[in-house]
Amino acid sequence: MSTNKEFDFKNYVRGRYFPHIWCPGCGHGIVLGALLRAVHELELDKNNIVMTSGIGCSSRISGYVDFHSLHTIHGRALAFATGVKLSRPNLKAIVPMGDGDALAIGGNHFIHAARRNIDITAIVMNNRIYGMTGGQFSPLSGTGKKATTAPYTTIDNNFDVVELAKAAGASFVARSTVFHASESKEYLKKAIMHKGFSVVEILSQCPTYYGRKNKEGDAATMMEGYRKNTVKIGSKKLDTNPDLIQRGIFVEDTDRPEYCEAYDEIIETAMKGKA
Amino acid sequence: MTNTSNIRFIQGNEACVEGALYAGINFFAGYPITPSTEIAEHLAQRLPAIGGKFIQMEDEIASMAAIIGASLTGSKVMTATSGPGFSLKQEALGYACMAEIPCVIANVQRGGPSTGNPTHVSQGDVNQARWGTHGDHSIVALTASNHQDVFKMTVEAFNIAETYRTPVVLLFDEVIGHMREKLEIPERGELPVVDRLRTSVPKGVDYHPYLPREDGRLPMSDFGAEHRYNVTGLFHDMWGFPNNDPQVVSDLLRHLVDKIENNWENICFYKEHWLDDADYVLISYGSSARSAKHIARNRRKRGMKIGVLELQTIWPFPTEIVREKCANAKAVMVVEMNMGQVVTQVKSAVDHPEKVFLANRIDGQLISPTDIKTTLRMIQGKGV
Ligand SMILES: Cc1ncc(C[n+]2csc(CCOP(=O)(O)OP(=O)(O)O)c2C)c(N)n1
Ligand code: SF4
């Protein structure tokens, strides 16, 4: 979509809240940039957006943006956002989350929000580590990784965010990385406009903990890794290297009823006195 | 002719639902748990019929979170639970204290700890209601001993939540929740119904969501309206931005406590029965107050100067009222169904704590008038 005005970061952030808390080289700022560009290009009214987040480095996004913002408790952002959305379905609900926030402590809310297909956009900023608390492993670290709570390497298997979201019933599921910032932006635009529960996983580096512990180099090297180790869905490169991570839109189902719309039908029935 | 269309013969949990509807509830999120489930079931039926929203969440944490989110968009909200669920709600309840979000939490008490005694009565969550969430804070908890009062206290709970921007706990118990008795639903206007204060700051002018007025109240702006602001559970400044400046931290904590404690008189509900000349004062609340009243009425007939102070506000604890009403008592007896949670408060309220005794039951059975009589006779030095 073409927009009348050039994108200007300052129109979307709260100057008073800066400087931000993120380390130099953190991927989370790129996600923020992609998200704000997406909102700009969609020409959304800032008054109609509620940004709800939990606790973590990633969750700080909600405070930085000039939307209605709700910075809640660790893992529960989707449950708070469910209350916002069902109470006022005309508002756009966007929920940025860390991988631990979304899928360890918040895993139950994640699958149930997906199951309901409530119109919320969940952005999983996957750095495969607990950044805010200083580098403990997360349910997305995978095996054989180092973390402060896995000094001898992890033995925990990891979730695949895309497969989990699909299986739980999310009607829009995509994956990208902060190296692919404009692709991320495009997926975010689609996710935000999608009617139903949408999940966008964005791989985002934490050079401070994950990178340092696992000798993955500095931020630039880690981003370079996202370029090398990911491919578009169905790429031929997968034939020779099946370990490559696929990027793209995995699910886009517009037929499934959205939760708030389904509830409106309940209201219609109840108002006619048919219970 | 009397109007009988307002008269119901229902459970206490339904009386709570009627009170909530009278107060203007339009959003409920919950998770089933005995003995509170009827509150959710009835609201599932009633709310959509008035255009309101009901949602069964995946657990009690999510339910508490959902009502907070809904409240921020301008809805009047409530959740209902019992012990195990009340434990799960505590972190988000503290968030509502910190972020000053109006909400009502009904806890229909069962015996605990843990799964405890799901279908039996207890009043074991009095201290949990006060201190269940971590950190210094204040809280409001109301209770009732009959359905007319369940209705009234539920309306008051919403009014207090909206006035002071605080979570309010309705601390009912299994007997009250499940017992059936008459409820006469008041006409519109008979009981006051309070809506939250909304900001008059116009669009384009800087709105400070967390700058209290002189009276400590904070006018709100609904999410979706023209003022965009931040809400957080971190200590925050007047814009709602995280701030750990020592002055900001201590000012906010004091504000959170003072807005409740300094208004205790406006939040304080109690009833007194035959207290004017009472030598013996029974202090009770919830279903145990019914037995206390019964025995007092019975002993009065035999010439004993005994009365009952029935607490309806448990938190903030009505220390002044208790001290005043017990000033001339020969003995004070707290009647409750726990190991002595309110009695501790009473002892520290009165001038003569050595004259304060406990009549309790902790076995899941409603404390009976005979149980109270037995303790009374022991205090009097008579055989049992
Ligand atoms: C109930 C609770 N448990 C634990 C914490 C501590 N905690 C804060 S953030 C966090 C994990 C952050 O990791 P992630 O969600 O992956 O986000 P990131 O910081 O990496 O962006 C933890 C464990 C908390 N705030 N609340
Ligand atoms: S600790 Fe990691 S996730 Fe947190 S700000 Fe620093 S780089 Fe980013």
Image (tube, coloured by chain):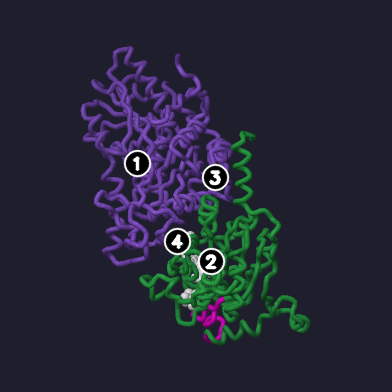
Chain colours: A green, B purple
Q: Which residue is the site of mark 3?
A: B53
Distance from disc 4 to disc 3, alpha carbons, whole Å, reads 22 Å
Q: Which residue is the site of mark 1?
A: B315
Q: Is residue A24 above or below residue B345?
A: below
Q: Quadrant of the N terminus of chain B?
A: top left
Distance from disc 4 to disc 1, alpha carbons, whole Å, reads 33 Å
**Secondary-structure class at tag 3:** strand
Mark 1 or 3: the one toward you = 3
- Evaluate whether residue B275 shows in this view: yes
Is the residue at mark 4 in contact range of ligand 1, meaning its CB lies under 8 Å from it? no
Q: Which residue is the site of mark 2?
A: A97
Distance from disc 2 to disc 1, alpha carbons, whole Å, reads 36 Å
- Contact, CB < 8 Å: mark 4 with mark 3? no
Is the residue at mark 2 in contact range of ligand 1, meaning its CB lies under 8 Å from it? yes
For label 4, count other residues whose C-alpha is less than 10 Å away and answer few (under 14), some (14-19) or many (20+): many
Amino acid, disc 4: His
**Marks 4, 3 in one chain:** no
Which callout, 2 or 4, points at the residue further toward the start of the chain? 4
The residue located at (50%, 35%) in the rendering is B17
- Contact, CB < 8 Å: mark 2 with mark 4? no
Chain letter of the residue carrying label 1: B
Please name whichever residue, B154 or B31, is drawn nearer the observer in this view of the structure: B154
- Contact, CB < 8 Å: mark 2 with mark 3? no
**Secondary-structure class at tag 4:** strand
Identity of the residue furthest to the front in this view? A4
Distance from disc 2 to disc 4, alpha carbons, whole Å, reads 17 Å
Which callout, 1 or 3, points at the residue further toward the start of the chain? 3
